[in-house]
Image: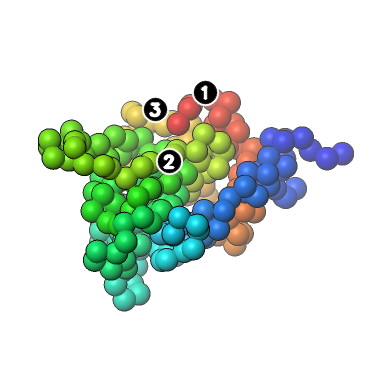
Amino acid sequence: MEAPPGEGRPGEGPPEGAAYQWATLDEPWREAFRQAWQALRTGNVPVGACAATADGEIVHAARNRVTDPAAPPGEVAGSALAHAEINVLARLPFRHRRDLVLTTTLEPCLQCAAAIRLGPIATVRFAGADRYWDGCHEFGKLSAREARRTQPARIGPRADELGLFATLISRIGPALTPRYQQALRTLGEAALTDLARQLTGGSEVRLLTAMEPAAAFGYLWPRLNDVVNSAETL
Ligand SMILES: [Zn+2]
């Protein structure tokens, strides 16, 4: 008997709901998730991003490289600056036409929100909510001039399991220190932090990195729904 949406179990393949959500993603979204997955596989913070034209042609895609010793020309590695969005924006020429769409798997942090504001970005789309940096894009509060200026439009976070998946994967790996876990719990992200810790500390992370992101989303679908059912809304 075919499992109804949300009833899939590990090893059975993507549940219907996960396959449906994944099928709705356009190519920039898929590229951002592919980049995030490459960050996971290389021991960086799993966030990926790309810049595309309004009709979806990808201009540059990049990933988090905070633990990498080196980066492709024009990108940064090995420091707290080496976020996915920074590595996309660093490759866009000065005074580039300002109508690009930046698609990123996670709500931009303080430095990335500022770089997006300075970059040639008309719209930022993000999948996962990030309570840690929520509100850090409101530059209109900083000065009267910023308040008068048109800020990049924001689309996100996604209210579905794919958004939760994007937040979860960003928590897996080197960033999940005890102090960071405590901060996330204080911000109300307890159930997702438990899941991230379970995946980071166990053997499943190797299983996940061997999968493609669509398959991993299907694999994690039941536990993402457990987080949804825990009433922890992101
Ligand atoms: Zn960032």
Q: Are marks 1 and 3 in contact (CB under 8 Å)?
A: no
Badge 1 amino acid: Ala
Q: Marks 2 and 3, Cα distance to the nearest angstrom? A: 22 Å
Left or right of 188 on screen, residue 142? left
Residue 51, position as x, y percentages in the image: 41, 59
Compared with residue 147, is residue 119 higher up or lower down, i.e. above or below? Answer: below
Residue at point 29%, 72% (across, down) = 74
Kindly tell me whether residue 76 is visible in this rendering.
Answer: no
Q: Marks 1 and 3, Cα distance to the nearest angstrom? A: 11 Å
Residue 147, position as x, y percentages in the image: 19, 36
The disc, 2 or 3, on the residue closer to the chain's N-terminal end is: 2
Residue 218, position as x, y percentages in the image: 65, 47
The disc, 1 or 3, on the residue closer to the chain's N-terminal end is: 3
Badge 2 amino acid: Ile
Residue 152, position as x, y percentages in the image: 32, 45
In this rendered view, identify the residue nearer to me: 201 or 205.
205
Residue at point 54%, 25% (across, down) = 230
Task: Look at mark 2 in the image and give the residue it sits on.
Answer: 155
Task: Look at mark 3 in the image and give the residue it sits on.
Answer: 188
Badge 3 amino acid: Gly
Mark 1 lies within 8 Å of ligand 1 (Cβ measured): no
Q: Are marks 1 and 2 in contact (CB under 8 Å)?
A: no
Compared with residue 142, is residue 175 higher up or lower down, i.e. above or below? Answer: below
Q: Which quadrant would the C terminus be assigned to in this image?
A: top left
